[in-house]
Amino acid sequence: MSYFVYGMIGWTLRLSFGRRTNAWSTDDSFAGLSNYTGLLDDPEFTHAFSNLLEFTFVFIFGCLLSGLIMALLLEKGIRGEGLFRSIYLYPMAISFIAMGTSWRWLLDSARDDKATGINMIFQWFNLGFLQNDWYTSATGSMYAMALPAIWQMAGYVMALFLAGFRGIPDDLREAARVDGASEYKIYRHILFPQLSPTFLTVLIILGHISMKVFDLIYGIAAKSYVTKVLAIYLWQVIFDFQNFAKGAAIAILMLVLVAIVVVPYLRYVNKSEDARS
Amino acid sequence: MSTDTVQRDLNTKDISRTKRKLDARGKFALVFRYLALTILLVIAAFPIYIMVINSIKGITGVSQGNAFLPPKKLDFEAWGPTWAILREPMIRTLFFVLQSSIISAIIGSINGFVFAKWRFKGSNVIFTMFLFGMFIPYQAIMIPLVQFNNNIGLSKSIYVLVVAHVIYGIPICTLIFRNYYAAIPNELIEAARVDGASMVRIYLTIILPLSIPGFVVVLIWQFTSAWNDFLFAIFLTGGSPKLAVATTALNFITGSATTVYYGNNMTASLIVSIPTLLVYMFLGRYFLRGLLSGSLKG
Protein backbone atom coordinates (compact mmCIF):
# COMPACT_ATOMS: atom_id res chain seq x y z
CA MET A 1 0.00 0.00 0.00
CA SER A 2 2.83 2.36 0.76
CA TYR A 3 3.80 2.06 -2.89
CA PHE A 4 0.37 3.24 -3.97
CA VAL A 5 0.48 6.22 -1.65
CA TYR A 6 4.09 7.29 -1.29
CA GLY A 7 5.49 5.73 -4.44
CA MET A 8 2.87 7.33 -6.59
CA ILE A 9 3.23 10.67 -4.86
CA GLY A 10 6.91 10.43 -5.74
CA TRP A 11 6.00 9.65 -9.32
CA THR A 12 3.68 12.64 -9.48
CA LEU A 13 6.42 14.79 -7.98
CA ARG A 14 8.82 13.63 -10.66
CA LEU A 15 6.24 14.46 -13.35
CA SER A 16 5.77 17.90 -11.91
CA PHE A 17 9.44 18.68 -12.49
CA GLY A 18 9.35 17.32 -16.02
CA ARG A 19 8.43 18.54 -19.48
CA ARG A 20 5.53 16.31 -20.46
CA THR A 21 3.26 19.19 -21.28
CA ASN A 22 1.15 17.44 -23.92
CA ALA A 23 -0.25 14.01 -24.59
CA TRP A 24 2.47 12.95 -27.04
CA SER A 25 5.50 14.16 -25.18
CA THR A 26 7.95 11.52 -24.07
CA ASP A 27 10.46 14.12 -23.01
CA ASP A 28 11.76 12.92 -19.66
CA SER A 29 14.25 15.70 -19.03
CA PHE A 30 14.03 17.90 -15.99
CA ALA A 31 12.39 21.28 -16.22
CA GLY A 32 13.25 22.31 -12.69
CA LEU A 33 10.65 24.42 -11.00
CA SER A 34 9.30 25.93 -14.19
CA ASN A 35 5.95 24.18 -13.90
CA TYR A 36 5.47 25.70 -10.47
CA THR A 37 6.64 29.19 -11.34
CA GLY A 38 4.47 28.95 -14.44
CA LEU A 39 1.44 28.48 -12.21
CA LEU A 40 2.07 31.75 -10.44
CA ASP A 41 1.83 33.58 -13.77
CA ASP A 42 -1.27 31.67 -14.76
CA PRO A 43 -4.29 33.87 -13.99
CA GLU A 44 -6.63 30.87 -14.05
CA PHE A 45 -4.61 29.17 -11.38
CA THR A 46 -4.48 32.17 -9.07
CA HIS A 47 -8.19 32.69 -9.67
CA ALA A 48 -8.90 29.07 -8.72
CA PHE A 49 -6.67 29.38 -5.69
CA SER A 50 -8.32 32.51 -4.34
CA ASN A 51 -11.73 30.95 -5.02
CA LEU A 52 -10.69 27.98 -2.95
CA LEU A 53 -9.59 30.14 -0.03
CA GLU A 54 -12.84 32.07 -0.15
CA PHE A 55 -14.84 28.87 -0.23
CA THR A 56 -12.86 27.32 2.61
CA PHE A 57 -13.40 30.32 4.83
CA VAL A 58 -17.17 30.48 4.34
CA PHE A 59 -17.58 26.71 4.41
CA ILE A 60 -15.72 26.18 7.68
CA PHE A 61 -17.34 29.13 9.38
CA GLY A 62 -20.84 28.12 8.24
CA CYS A 63 -20.41 24.48 9.22
CA LEU A 64 -19.03 25.30 12.64
CA LEU A 65 -21.81 27.75 13.34
CA SER A 66 -24.72 25.61 12.13
CA GLY A 67 -23.31 22.38 13.52
CA LEU A 68 -22.73 23.95 16.90
CA ILE A 69 -26.21 25.46 16.99
CA MET A 70 -27.77 22.08 16.21
CA ALA A 71 -25.66 20.36 18.84
CA LEU A 72 -26.51 23.00 21.45
CA LEU A 73 -30.22 22.66 20.75
CA LEU A 74 -30.07 18.88 21.09
CA GLU A 75 -27.38 18.48 23.68
CA LYS A 76 -29.54 18.45 26.81
CA GLY A 77 -31.80 15.80 25.35
CA ILE A 78 -35.20 16.47 23.89
CA ARG A 79 -38.11 14.31 22.83
CA GLY A 80 -37.69 13.33 19.20
CA GLU A 81 -33.94 13.83 19.23
CA GLY A 82 -33.41 10.71 17.14
CA LEU A 83 -35.61 12.04 14.36
CA PHE A 84 -33.97 15.46 14.28
CA ARG A 85 -30.54 13.90 14.30
CA SER A 86 -31.19 11.50 11.46
CA ILE A 87 -32.69 14.19 9.25
CA TYR A 88 -29.77 16.54 9.94
CA LEU A 89 -27.29 13.85 9.06
CA TYR A 90 -28.80 12.22 5.97
CA PRO A 91 -27.13 14.59 3.46
CA MET A 92 -23.87 12.81 4.27
CA ALA A 93 -25.28 9.63 2.76
CA ILE A 94 -26.05 11.11 -0.66
CA SER A 95 -23.59 11.86 -3.40
CA PHE A 96 -22.76 15.43 -4.31
CA ILE A 97 -23.55 14.67 -7.91
CA ALA A 98 -27.13 13.67 -7.05
CA MET A 99 -27.77 16.57 -4.70
CA GLY A 100 -26.24 18.89 -7.26
CA THR A 101 -29.44 18.59 -9.30
CA SER A 102 -31.61 19.91 -6.49
CA TRP A 103 -29.17 22.64 -5.60
CA ARG A 104 -28.69 23.78 -9.15
CA TRP A 105 -32.38 24.37 -9.27
CA LEU A 106 -32.65 25.98 -5.83
CA LEU A 107 -29.80 28.33 -6.67
CA ASP A 108 -31.13 29.19 -10.11
CA SER A 109 -30.20 32.70 -11.10
CA ALA A 110 -33.42 33.65 -12.93
CA ARG A 111 -35.26 36.50 -11.23
CA ASP A 112 -38.66 38.10 -10.77
CA ASP A 113 -41.25 36.58 -13.11
CA LYS A 114 -38.92 33.87 -14.25
CA ALA A 115 -37.57 33.02 -10.84
CA THR A 116 -37.49 29.49 -9.52
CA GLY A 117 -35.79 28.10 -6.47
CA ILE A 118 -34.71 30.33 -3.62
CA ASN A 119 -35.18 33.51 -5.63
CA MET A 120 -38.85 32.64 -5.84
CA ILE A 121 -39.09 31.94 -2.11
CA PHE A 122 -37.64 35.39 -1.45
CA GLN A 123 -40.47 36.90 -3.46
CA TRP A 124 -43.15 35.11 -1.47
CA PHE A 125 -41.89 36.81 1.63
CA ASN A 126 -41.59 40.17 -0.12
CA LEU A 127 -37.85 39.92 0.08
CA GLY A 128 -37.43 40.27 -3.68
CA PHE A 129 -34.43 42.54 -3.22
CA LEU A 130 -32.49 39.57 -1.86
CA GLN A 131 -32.65 37.78 -5.19
CA ASN A 132 -29.25 37.20 -6.65
CA ASP A 133 -27.21 35.29 -9.17
CA TRP A 134 -25.98 32.68 -6.69
CA TYR A 135 -23.26 30.50 -8.07
CA THR A 136 -23.18 32.29 -11.41
CA SER A 137 -22.44 35.66 -9.85
CA ALA A 138 -19.05 37.13 -10.58
CA THR A 139 -18.35 38.17 -7.01
CA GLY A 140 -20.35 35.97 -4.66
CA SER A 141 -20.18 32.64 -6.48
CA MET A 142 -18.07 30.91 -3.87
CA TYR A 143 -20.33 32.06 -1.06
CA ALA A 144 -23.28 30.56 -2.91
CA MET A 145 -21.34 27.37 -3.54
CA ALA A 146 -20.60 27.08 0.17
CA LEU A 147 -24.33 26.77 0.91
CA PRO A 148 -24.80 23.22 -0.40
CA ALA A 149 -21.46 22.29 1.13
CA ILE A 150 -22.55 23.55 4.53
CA TRP A 151 -25.89 21.81 4.09
CA GLN A 152 -24.11 18.55 3.43
CA MET A 153 -21.57 18.68 6.24
CA ALA A 154 -23.35 20.53 9.06
CA GLY A 155 -24.97 17.34 10.33
CA TYR A 156 -21.59 15.68 10.63
CA VAL A 157 -20.24 18.61 12.61
CA MET A 158 -23.32 18.39 14.82
CA ALA A 159 -22.66 14.70 15.46
CA LEU A 160 -19.05 15.38 16.43
CA PHE A 161 -20.00 18.18 18.80
CA LEU A 162 -22.84 16.16 20.25
CA ALA A 163 -20.44 13.29 20.92
CA GLY A 164 -18.15 15.83 22.57
CA PHE A 165 -20.91 17.18 24.81
CA ARG A 166 -22.05 13.70 25.76
CA GLY A 167 -18.50 12.80 26.69
CA ILE A 168 -18.49 15.42 29.44
CA PRO A 169 -19.70 13.94 32.72
CA ASP A 170 -22.98 15.43 33.94
CA ASP A 171 -21.57 15.86 37.43
CA LEU A 172 -19.42 18.72 36.19
CA ARG A 173 -22.45 20.64 35.09
CA GLU A 174 -24.43 19.76 38.20
CA ALA A 175 -21.61 20.88 40.45
CA ALA A 176 -21.39 24.24 38.69
CA ARG A 177 -25.14 24.63 38.91
CA VAL A 178 -25.11 23.96 42.64
CA ASP A 179 -22.43 26.60 42.96
CA GLY A 180 -24.87 29.01 41.37
CA ALA A 181 -23.29 29.42 37.94
CA SER A 182 -25.66 30.67 35.23
CA GLU A 183 -26.31 28.48 32.19
CA TYR A 184 -24.29 30.83 30.04
CA LYS A 185 -21.35 30.62 32.42
CA ILE A 186 -21.54 26.85 32.52
CA TYR A 187 -21.18 26.72 28.75
CA ARG A 188 -18.58 29.44 28.55
CA HIS A 189 -16.28 28.28 31.34
CA ILE A 190 -16.96 24.60 31.79
CA LEU A 191 -18.33 22.93 28.68
CA PHE A 192 -16.62 24.79 25.83
CA PRO A 193 -13.08 24.43 27.21
CA GLN A 194 -13.68 20.67 27.39
CA LEU A 195 -14.62 20.70 23.74
CA SER A 196 -11.40 22.15 22.39
CA PRO A 197 -10.11 18.80 21.08
CA THR A 198 -13.43 18.38 19.28
CA PHE A 199 -13.07 21.86 17.81
CA LEU A 200 -9.64 20.99 16.51
CA THR A 201 -10.87 17.73 14.98
CA VAL A 202 -13.75 19.50 13.27
CA LEU A 203 -11.45 22.18 11.88
CA ILE A 204 -9.04 19.62 10.48
CA ILE A 205 -11.77 17.50 8.93
CA LEU A 206 -13.52 20.44 7.33
CA GLY A 207 -10.22 21.97 6.25
CA HIS A 208 -8.99 18.96 4.38
CA ILE A 209 -12.38 18.29 2.80
CA SER A 210 -12.52 21.85 1.60
CA MET A 211 -9.06 21.79 0.02
CA LYS A 212 -10.12 18.79 -2.03
CA VAL A 213 -13.63 19.92 -2.95
CA PHE A 214 -14.46 18.62 -6.41
CA ASP A 215 -17.70 16.67 -6.99
CA LEU A 216 -19.83 19.20 -5.15
CA ILE A 217 -18.80 21.99 -7.49
CA TYR A 218 -18.65 19.79 -10.54
CA GLY A 219 -22.17 18.50 -9.86
CA ILE A 220 -23.62 21.98 -9.72
CA ALA A 221 -21.59 24.18 -12.03
CA ALA A 222 -19.29 21.77 -13.92
CA LYS A 223 -16.25 23.68 -15.16
CA SER A 224 -17.75 27.15 -14.94
CA TYR A 225 -15.08 29.82 -14.56
CA VAL A 226 -16.52 31.73 -11.61
CA THR A 227 -16.58 28.70 -9.34
CA LYS A 228 -13.32 27.13 -10.42
CA VAL A 229 -11.18 25.67 -7.64
CA LEU A 230 -7.88 23.79 -7.76
CA ALA A 231 -9.42 20.34 -8.20
CA ILE A 232 -11.61 21.50 -11.09
CA TYR A 233 -8.76 23.30 -12.79
CA LEU A 234 -6.54 20.26 -12.38
CA TRP A 235 -9.19 18.12 -14.03
CA GLN A 236 -9.25 20.50 -16.99
CA VAL A 237 -5.48 20.69 -17.25
CA ILE A 238 -5.14 16.91 -17.31
CA PHE A 239 -8.14 15.88 -19.38
CA ASP A 240 -8.86 18.80 -21.66
CA PHE A 241 -5.35 20.14 -22.20
CA GLN A 242 -3.48 16.87 -21.48
CA ASN A 243 -0.77 18.84 -19.76
CA PHE A 244 0.49 16.22 -17.34
CA ALA A 245 3.46 18.15 -16.00
CA LYS A 246 1.32 21.11 -15.06
CA GLY A 247 -1.43 18.88 -13.67
CA ALA A 248 1.11 17.10 -11.51
CA ALA A 249 2.37 20.42 -10.19
CA ILE A 250 -1.16 21.45 -9.17
CA ALA A 251 -1.72 18.04 -7.57
CA ILE A 252 1.46 18.39 -5.53
CA LEU A 253 0.41 21.84 -4.39
CA MET A 254 -2.93 20.42 -3.26
CA LEU A 255 -1.09 17.71 -1.39
CA VAL A 256 1.10 20.28 0.33
CA LEU A 257 -1.96 22.29 1.34
CA VAL A 258 -3.60 19.22 2.85
CA ALA A 259 -0.36 18.15 4.53
CA ILE A 260 0.03 21.55 6.18
CA VAL A 261 -3.39 21.05 7.75
CA VAL A 262 -3.19 17.35 8.56
CA VAL A 263 0.38 16.39 9.44
CA PRO A 264 0.74 18.50 12.61
CA TYR A 265 -2.61 17.15 13.69
CA LEU A 266 -1.60 13.53 13.16
CA ARG A 267 1.53 14.17 15.20
CA TYR A 268 -0.51 15.77 17.95
CA VAL A 269 -2.94 12.86 18.06
CA ASN A 270 -0.07 10.43 18.13
CA LYS A 271 1.62 12.23 21.00
CA SER A 272 -1.48 12.56 23.12
CA GLU A 273 -2.10 8.88 22.57
CA ASP A 274 1.39 7.97 23.71
CA ALA A 275 0.89 10.10 26.79
CA ARG A 276 -2.27 8.20 27.59
CA SER A 277 -0.94 4.70 27.24
CA MET B 1 -7.53 8.32 18.98
CA SER B 2 -10.39 7.71 21.25
CA THR B 3 -10.97 4.07 21.82
CA ASP B 4 -14.62 4.02 22.64
CA THR B 5 -16.16 5.74 19.67
CA VAL B 6 -17.20 2.61 17.89
CA GLN B 7 -19.05 1.37 20.91
CA ARG B 8 -20.36 4.74 21.86
CA ASP B 9 -23.50 5.76 20.14
CA LEU B 10 -24.90 9.15 20.57
CA ASN B 11 -27.27 7.66 23.10
CA THR B 12 -30.24 9.87 23.52
CA LYS B 13 -30.02 11.53 26.85
CA ASP B 14 -32.24 10.49 29.69
CA ILE B 15 -34.81 13.24 29.76
CA SER B 16 -36.87 12.07 32.68
CA ARG B 17 -35.23 14.84 34.66
CA THR B 18 -36.77 17.49 32.45
CA LYS B 19 -40.21 16.03 32.90
CA ARG B 20 -40.57 17.86 36.17
CA LYS B 21 -42.96 20.75 36.02
CA LEU B 22 -41.53 23.55 33.95
CA ASP B 23 -41.98 27.14 34.98
CA ALA B 24 -43.09 29.68 32.39
CA ARG B 25 -39.53 30.45 31.39
CA GLY B 26 -38.64 26.80 30.98
CA LYS B 27 -41.71 26.26 28.84
CA PHE B 28 -40.80 29.15 26.64
CA ALA B 29 -37.27 27.82 26.25
CA LEU B 30 -38.58 24.41 25.28
CA VAL B 31 -40.96 25.84 22.69
CA PHE B 32 -38.16 27.95 21.31
CA ARG B 33 -35.88 24.93 21.03
CA TYR B 34 -38.51 22.92 19.18
CA LEU B 35 -39.20 25.82 16.86
CA ALA B 36 -35.53 26.28 16.02
CA LEU B 37 -35.02 22.55 15.56
CA THR B 38 -38.02 22.34 13.26
CA ILE B 39 -36.83 25.22 11.09
CA LEU B 40 -33.46 23.51 10.73
CA LEU B 41 -35.24 20.25 9.97
CA VAL B 42 -37.18 21.86 7.13
CA ILE B 43 -33.99 23.34 5.67
CA ALA B 44 -32.18 20.01 5.91
CA ALA B 45 -35.02 18.07 4.33
CA PHE B 46 -35.82 20.62 1.63
CA PRO B 47 -33.49 19.54 -1.19
CA ILE B 48 -34.60 15.93 -0.97
CA TYR B 49 -38.23 17.03 -0.78
CA ILE B 50 -37.75 18.97 -4.02
CA MET B 51 -36.18 15.94 -5.58
CA VAL B 52 -38.97 13.57 -4.59
CA ILE B 53 -41.97 15.71 -5.50
CA ASN B 54 -40.54 16.74 -8.84
CA SER B 55 -39.69 13.20 -9.81
CA ILE B 56 -43.36 12.24 -9.80
CA LYS B 57 -44.65 14.97 -12.11
CA GLY B 58 -43.66 13.44 -15.40
CA ILE B 59 -40.83 14.46 -17.70
CA THR B 60 -42.10 17.90 -18.57
CA GLY B 61 -44.54 18.34 -15.72
CA VAL B 62 -42.25 20.49 -13.60
CA SER B 63 -43.11 24.12 -14.05
CA GLN B 64 -42.21 27.33 -12.40
CA GLY B 65 -45.54 27.58 -10.62
CA ASN B 66 -45.78 24.11 -9.16
CA ALA B 67 -42.17 23.39 -8.35
CA PHE B 68 -42.50 23.61 -4.59
CA LEU B 69 -45.81 21.81 -4.38
CA PRO B 70 -46.54 18.10 -4.41
CA PRO B 71 -48.14 16.97 -7.68
CA LYS B 72 -51.93 16.86 -8.02
CA LYS B 73 -51.72 13.35 -9.35
CA LEU B 74 -48.86 10.93 -9.39
CA ASP B 75 -47.07 10.58 -12.70
CA PHE B 76 -44.19 8.14 -12.92
CA GLU B 77 -43.59 8.86 -16.60
CA ALA B 78 -40.00 9.95 -15.96
CA TRP B 79 -39.08 6.81 -14.05
CA GLY B 80 -39.20 4.32 -16.91
CA PRO B 81 -36.77 5.94 -19.35
CA THR B 82 -34.43 7.10 -16.59
CA TRP B 83 -34.25 3.67 -15.07
CA ALA B 84 -33.58 2.20 -18.48
CA ILE B 85 -30.45 4.33 -18.73
CA LEU B 86 -29.35 3.86 -15.14
CA ARG B 87 -30.07 0.18 -14.70
CA GLU B 88 -26.86 -1.13 -16.16
CA PRO B 89 -24.53 1.37 -14.47
CA MET B 90 -26.27 0.77 -11.15
CA ILE B 91 -25.85 -2.98 -11.35
CA ARG B 92 -22.21 -2.45 -12.29
CA THR B 93 -21.77 -0.13 -9.33
CA LEU B 94 -23.35 -2.59 -6.95
CA PHE B 95 -21.02 -5.29 -8.24
CA PHE B 96 -17.82 -3.36 -7.73
CA VAL B 97 -18.89 -1.62 -4.53
CA LEU B 98 -19.76 -4.88 -2.78
CA GLN B 99 -16.48 -6.47 -3.76
CA SER B 100 -14.33 -3.54 -2.80
CA SER B 101 -16.05 -3.05 0.55
CA ILE B 102 -15.78 -6.69 1.53
CA ILE B 103 -12.12 -6.97 0.56
CA SER B 104 -11.11 -3.74 2.24
CA ALA B 105 -13.04 -4.66 5.39
CA ILE B 106 -11.16 -7.96 5.68
CA ILE B 107 -7.77 -6.36 5.13
CA GLY B 108 -8.69 -3.50 7.45
CA SER B 109 -9.66 -5.92 10.17
CA ILE B 110 -6.33 -7.77 10.03
CA ASN B 111 -4.36 -4.52 9.93
CA GLY B 112 -6.41 -3.07 12.74
CA PHE B 113 -5.71 -6.09 14.89
CA VAL B 114 -1.98 -5.83 14.26
CA PHE B 115 -1.87 -2.13 15.09
CA ALA B 116 -4.07 -2.47 18.17
CA LYS B 117 -2.67 -5.58 19.83
CA TRP B 118 0.65 -6.35 18.32
CA ARG B 119 2.60 -3.26 19.21
CA PHE B 120 6.02 -3.43 17.67
CA LYS B 121 8.79 -0.87 17.54
CA GLY B 122 7.86 1.97 15.26
CA SER B 123 4.28 0.78 14.90
CA ASN B 124 3.01 4.22 15.82
CA VAL B 125 5.05 5.92 13.13
CA ILE B 126 3.91 3.41 10.54
CA PHE B 127 0.34 3.82 11.66
CA THR B 128 0.58 7.59 11.29
CA MET B 129 2.01 7.18 7.80
CA PHE B 130 -0.85 4.84 7.10
CA LEU B 131 -3.37 7.38 8.24
CA PHE B 132 -1.91 10.07 6.04
CA GLY B 133 -3.02 7.95 3.10
CA MET B 134 -6.56 8.63 4.21
CA PHE B 135 -6.21 12.37 3.89
CA ILE B 136 -4.24 12.78 0.67
CA PRO B 137 -6.02 14.41 -2.23
CA TYR B 138 -6.35 11.52 -4.66
CA GLN B 139 -5.36 13.84 -7.45
CA ALA B 140 -1.81 13.53 -6.18
CA ILE B 141 -1.73 9.85 -7.18
CA MET B 142 -4.15 9.91 -10.07
CA ILE B 143 -1.81 10.27 -13.07
CA PRO B 144 0.51 7.45 -11.94
CA LEU B 145 -2.48 5.31 -11.01
CA VAL B 146 -3.96 5.66 -14.50
CA GLN B 147 -0.55 4.78 -15.96
CA PHE B 148 -0.20 1.83 -13.62
CA ASN B 149 -3.61 0.50 -14.62
CA ASN B 150 -2.75 0.88 -18.30
CA ASN B 151 0.49 -1.01 -17.76
CA ILE B 152 -1.11 -3.99 -16.08
CA GLY B 153 -4.01 -3.94 -18.52
CA LEU B 154 -6.67 -3.22 -15.93
CA SER B 155 -7.98 0.01 -17.37
CA LYS B 156 -10.66 -1.58 -19.52
CA SER B 157 -12.46 -3.40 -16.75
CA ILE B 158 -14.48 -2.42 -13.73
CA TYR B 159 -11.84 -4.02 -11.49
CA VAL B 160 -9.93 -0.82 -11.90
CA LEU B 161 -12.37 0.69 -9.43
CA VAL B 162 -12.34 -2.33 -7.13
CA VAL B 163 -8.57 -2.05 -6.81
CA ALA B 164 -8.62 1.71 -6.27
CA HIS B 165 -11.27 1.61 -3.59
CA VAL B 166 -9.64 -1.28 -1.80
CA ILE B 167 -6.20 0.31 -1.72
CA TYR B 168 -7.28 3.78 -0.74
CA GLY B 169 -10.00 2.48 1.57
CA ILE B 170 -7.60 0.44 3.68
CA PRO B 171 -6.42 3.34 5.90
CA ILE B 172 -9.88 4.28 7.11
CA CYS B 173 -10.89 0.63 7.56
CA THR B 174 -7.73 0.00 9.54
CA LEU B 175 -8.40 3.02 11.72
CA ILE B 176 -11.96 2.02 12.51
CA PHE B 177 -10.98 -1.56 13.33
CA ARG B 178 -8.00 -0.47 15.37
CA ASN B 179 -10.18 1.77 17.52
CA TYR B 180 -12.67 -1.03 17.84
CA TYR B 181 -10.11 -3.63 18.88
CA ALA B 182 -8.40 -1.30 21.31
CA ALA B 183 -11.47 -1.71 23.52
CA ILE B 184 -11.03 -5.49 23.71
CA PRO B 185 -9.19 -6.15 26.99
CA ASN B 186 -5.56 -7.15 26.61
CA GLU B 187 -6.01 -9.76 29.33
CA LEU B 188 -8.14 -11.78 26.97
CA ILE B 189 -5.31 -11.97 24.48
CA GLU B 190 -2.65 -12.52 27.14
CA ALA B 191 -4.61 -15.44 28.52
CA ALA B 192 -4.87 -17.07 25.12
CA ARG B 193 -1.18 -16.48 24.57
CA VAL B 194 -0.29 -18.13 27.84
CA ASP B 195 -2.33 -21.10 26.69
CA GLY B 196 -0.06 -21.24 23.68
CA ALA B 197 -2.28 -19.82 20.95
CA SER B 198 -0.52 -18.10 18.06
CA MET B 199 -1.42 -14.57 16.99
CA VAL B 200 -3.17 -15.96 13.90
CA ARG B 201 -5.19 -18.34 16.02
CA ILE B 202 -6.06 -15.58 18.48
CA TYR B 203 -7.27 -13.43 15.62
CA LEU B 204 -9.40 -16.18 14.12
CA THR B 205 -10.92 -17.60 17.28
CA ILE B 206 -11.17 -14.63 19.62
CA ILE B 207 -11.04 -11.39 17.67
CA LEU B 208 -12.98 -12.27 14.55
CA PRO B 209 -16.13 -13.49 16.33
CA LEU B 210 -16.17 -10.24 18.29
CA SER B 211 -15.84 -8.17 15.13
CA ILE B 212 -19.31 -8.35 13.64
CA PRO B 213 -20.39 -4.84 14.67
CA GLY B 214 -17.04 -3.50 13.47
CA PHE B 215 -17.58 -5.16 10.12
CA VAL B 216 -21.03 -3.68 9.78
CA VAL B 217 -19.65 -0.20 10.45
CA VAL B 218 -16.80 -0.57 7.98
CA LEU B 219 -18.90 -2.20 5.27
CA ILE B 220 -21.48 0.56 5.44
CA TRP B 221 -18.82 3.21 5.39
CA GLN B 222 -17.08 1.71 2.38
CA PHE B 223 -20.33 1.00 0.59
CA THR B 224 -21.52 4.58 0.93
CA SER B 225 -18.25 6.22 0.01
CA ALA B 226 -17.59 3.96 -2.98
CA TRP B 227 -21.14 4.30 -4.23
CA ASN B 228 -20.99 8.08 -4.00
CA ASP B 229 -17.46 8.40 -5.32
CA PHE B 230 -17.10 10.48 -8.43
CA LEU B 231 -13.42 11.36 -8.55
CA PHE B 232 -12.01 7.86 -9.01
CA ALA B 233 -14.89 6.88 -11.26
CA ILE B 234 -14.38 9.70 -13.70
CA PHE B 235 -10.58 9.61 -13.70
CA LEU B 236 -10.12 5.86 -13.92
CA THR B 237 -12.86 5.00 -16.37
CA GLY B 238 -12.07 8.02 -18.51
CA GLY B 239 -15.80 8.57 -19.02
CA SER B 240 -16.10 5.38 -21.05
CA PRO B 241 -19.80 4.47 -21.28
CA LYS B 242 -18.96 0.79 -20.99
CA LEU B 243 -17.64 1.41 -17.51
CA ALA B 244 -20.21 3.98 -16.45
CA VAL B 245 -21.09 3.73 -12.77
CA ALA B 246 -23.96 5.34 -10.89
CA THR B 247 -22.42 8.77 -10.37
CA THR B 248 -20.85 9.13 -13.80
CA ALA B 249 -24.01 7.94 -15.57
CA LEU B 250 -26.02 10.39 -13.52
CA ASN B 251 -23.66 13.20 -14.35
CA PHE B 252 -24.02 12.28 -18.00
CA ILE B 253 -27.79 12.69 -17.74
CA THR B 254 -27.90 15.84 -15.63
CA GLY B 255 -24.84 17.59 -16.94
CA SER B 256 -25.10 17.25 -20.69
CA ALA B 257 -28.49 18.48 -21.82
CA THR B 258 -28.82 21.96 -23.23
CA THR B 259 -32.48 22.05 -22.28
CA VAL B 260 -32.80 21.01 -18.71
CA TYR B 261 -35.62 18.60 -17.99
CA TYR B 262 -35.87 18.85 -14.28
CA GLY B 263 -38.45 16.09 -14.06
CA ASN B 264 -35.95 13.74 -15.63
CA ASN B 265 -32.92 14.96 -13.73
CA MET B 266 -34.58 14.85 -10.35
CA THR B 267 -35.79 11.32 -11.01
CA ALA B 268 -32.35 10.15 -12.06
CA SER B 269 -30.73 11.74 -9.01
CA LEU B 270 -33.28 10.15 -6.75
CA ILE B 271 -32.83 6.69 -8.26
CA VAL B 272 -29.08 6.89 -7.82
CA SER B 273 -29.50 7.99 -4.19
CA ILE B 274 -31.95 5.26 -3.21
CA PRO B 275 -29.42 2.52 -2.29
CA THR B 276 -27.40 4.71 0.05
CA LEU B 277 -30.56 6.25 1.48
CA LEU B 278 -31.95 2.80 2.24
CA VAL B 279 -28.73 1.82 3.96
CA TYR B 280 -28.86 5.03 5.94
CA MET B 281 -32.48 4.53 6.92
CA PHE B 282 -32.05 1.00 8.18
CA LEU B 283 -28.49 1.07 9.43
CA GLY B 284 -28.04 4.75 10.24
CA ARG B 285 -26.77 3.95 13.70
CA TYR B 286 -23.77 2.15 12.24
CA PHE B 287 -23.24 4.86 9.67
CA LEU B 288 -22.98 7.34 12.51
CA ARG B 289 -20.48 5.17 14.35
CA GLY B 290 -18.36 5.04 11.22
CA LEU B 291 -18.43 8.80 10.97
CA LEU B 292 -17.44 9.22 14.58
CA SER B 293 -14.69 6.66 14.65
CA GLY B 294 -13.36 7.76 11.31
CA SER B 295 -12.67 11.13 12.81
CA LEU B 296 -9.64 10.08 14.85
CA LYS B 297 -10.57 11.91 18.02
CA GLY B 298 -14.14 12.21 19.13
Image (cartoon, coloured by chain):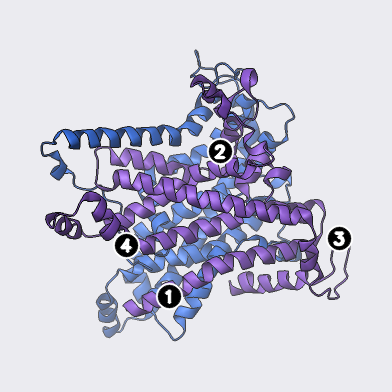
Instruction: Give me the chain letter of mark 4.
Output: A
Name the residue tied to disc 3. A22
Q: Earlier in the sequence, mark 2 or mark 4?
A: 2
Q: Are marks 4 and 1 in contact (CB under 8 Å)?
A: no
Judging depth in this view, the residue of A41 and B174 nearest the camera is A41
Would residue B206 be seen by someone viewing this image from the given angle?
yes
Task: Name which quarter of the figure residue A114 lies in.
Answer: top right
Name the residue tied to disc 2. A99
Query: Mark 1 belongs to which amino acid?
Result: Asn
Q: Nearer the viewer, mark 3 or mark 1?
A: 1
Judging depth in this view, the residue of B129 and B97 nearest the camera is B129
The residues bearing labels 3 and 2 have C-alpha atoms spaced at a distance of 35 Å
Q: Earlier in the sequence, mark 4 or mark 1?
A: 4
Q: Are marks 3 and 4 in contact (CB under 8 Å)?
A: no
Query: Mark 4 belongs to which amino acid?
Result: Pro
Name the residue tied to disc 4. A193
